[in-house]
Amino acid sequence: MSEYVKLASLKSINGFLAAIQRLNLHIPCDQEVLSGDASPLAQPITADGLTIGNRFTVQPMEGWDGTPDGRPSDLTFRRWRRFGSSGAKLIWGGEAVAVQHDGRANPNQLVLNEQTRDDIARLRDALVEEHRKACGSTDGLVIGLQLTHSGRYSRPKGKPEPRILYRHPILDRRLNLPDDYPVLTDGEIRQIIDSFIRAAKLAWQIGFDFVDVKHCHGYLGHEFLSAHTREGDYGGSFENRTRFLCEVVQGIRAEAPGLRIGVRLSAFDMVPFRPDPATSRPGKPGIGMPEPYEHLLPYRWGFGVNPQNPVEPDLTEPAAFLALLRELGILLVNLTAGSPYYNPHIQRPALYPPSDGYQPPEDPLAGVARQMWAVRTLKHQFPDTVIVGTAYTYLQEYIPYVAQAAVREGWTDLVGLGRMMLAYPELPRDVLEGRPLQTKRLCRTFSDCTTAPRNGLPSGCYPLDEFYRNSLLAEQLKRVKRSG
Ligand SMILES: Cc1cc2nc3c(=O)[nH]c(=O)nc-3n(C[C@H](O)[C@H](O)[C@H](O)COP(=O)(O)O)c2cc1C
Ligand code: SF4
């Protein structure tokens, strides 16, 4: 790890350019950042009849801080207000919101149903209000809600209660699932589809511009896409593996005709990774390495993975998926990759791992470049689809330079920011209004926002956001980290 580029210690954009050249990475980068109307990042873009006022997107960021019955708490309101104040004109989903209780990823995940709808409506209103205060108007502000069922990663009461679509030779072992552990039946899947449609209708009634039918990060929607080995209506062929999406979309079109639909997709994946025991020390996980997969070839448990070499992406099926989205009239797509549970270095490149992770097996800049490559490749094939790119936070000081070049050169339409929106939500406004970045507030990928919820605490930027840094929660997090 010591040899990885330390972005915080580079002195200038030339240092950054030299670093990516040394690593032989293809990352677009401008040498001067423009502001105001001249900035490519300030240009509006129209997606499915919605005009998005600029090219910054707040990615969905869950807080593990809802109430037991699925309503937002004060912490949730605070996070959404900060998202609103960012100046980004696309709010992609806010955070993952479960469509039914058993599909919650944790006992504090938001749930959208008749009982919680008014609270979630207020959450949206709070974001809009804060955006108005910060930006002077809400013109061009587009807000979606991310709908999810956590599937394999359901923990509605805190303990794992996986709802799986097929037996996975590696992930089942990690979850200690016995041989007779049940897979969801086609009938249970149809009930979940009804929950998605019901929740989408509620989201429409309370004013969201679109819903994201989540297909990423190992959760249920994503697991459908890799259900090669499942029998019945929802597994096997590409048509069957995308039936869940098609039925959800058909239902939403019928029940909420004015509501736009988006999809957040893990555009590629890899086998699960684990810490290398040879480099692991007490309190310090080893360097990430793939789980043994040689006996599993061709690998049939991934989506967007080369079956002969499952540590390599293969965008053939993801491209077919984007073609299907276009046929379904879905023109808003957010591309991410992998999963935070089994290959976090793919999903959210970081220098410091969360407590259940591993040391990065590659320079995290390579992870950024890989996601940018996938977005660029798919964008070229689908010029009419409006695409949000992911994994920009790791670029830190160099976000504006890379984001501007990526938009200007057509690598992506919108630049999504996740962790940076917890650490320094005003970054988009500072860039667009031509102010220098507040470098002390830049997310340095310490991963406490993941370590905290892995240990039952709410997420938040504990190192850099004073609110969390000075809270009792920070003391608890310190104790958890000390106890290793
Ligand atoms: C604390 C935390 C919560 C997240 N919650 C969600 C979520 O609710 N839905 C989702 O699709 N992605 C979620 N993500 C992933 C981010 O949206 C994003 O894809 C990831 O952090 C990489 O982008 P970044 O490099 O800008 O952080 C979360 C990430 C973190 C660190
Ligand atoms: S805790 Fe803060 S600095 Fe660390 S990864 Fe999360 S947002 Fe970034």
Image (spheres, rainbow, N blue to C red):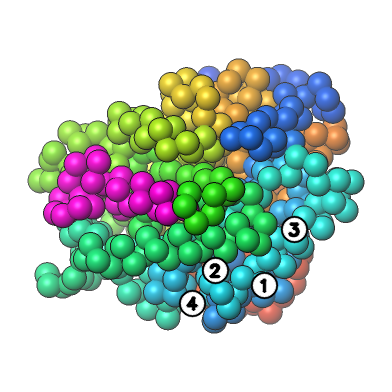
The answer for how far apart the CA atoms under marks 3 and 2 are is 17 Å
- What's the residue type where badge 4 is placed? Pro
The answer for how far apart the CA atoms under marks 1 and 2 are is 9 Å
The disc at residue 119 is 1
| Residue 128 against residue 262 in the figure, above or below | below
The answer for how far apart the CA atoms under marks 4 and 2 are is 14 Å
The answer for how far apart the CA atoms under marks 3 and 1 are is 13 Å
Q: Are marks 4 and 2 in contact (CB under 8 Å)?
A: no
For the point 25% across and 66% down, the residue is 187
The range drawn in magenta is 223-252
Q: Label 2 belongs to which residue?
A: 112
Q: Label 4 belongs to which residue?
A: 107
- Name the residue nearer the viewer: 116 or 425: 116
The answer for how far apart the CA atoms under marks 3 and 4 are is 24 Å
**Dot 3 or dot 2, earlier in sequence:** 2
For the point 66% across and 62% down, the residue is 206
Does residue 351 appear in this view?
no
Give x and y (percent) for residue 39.
Answer: 77, 24
**Dot 1 or dot 2, earlier in sequence:** 2
Q: Is mark 1 within 8 Å of ligand 1?
A: no
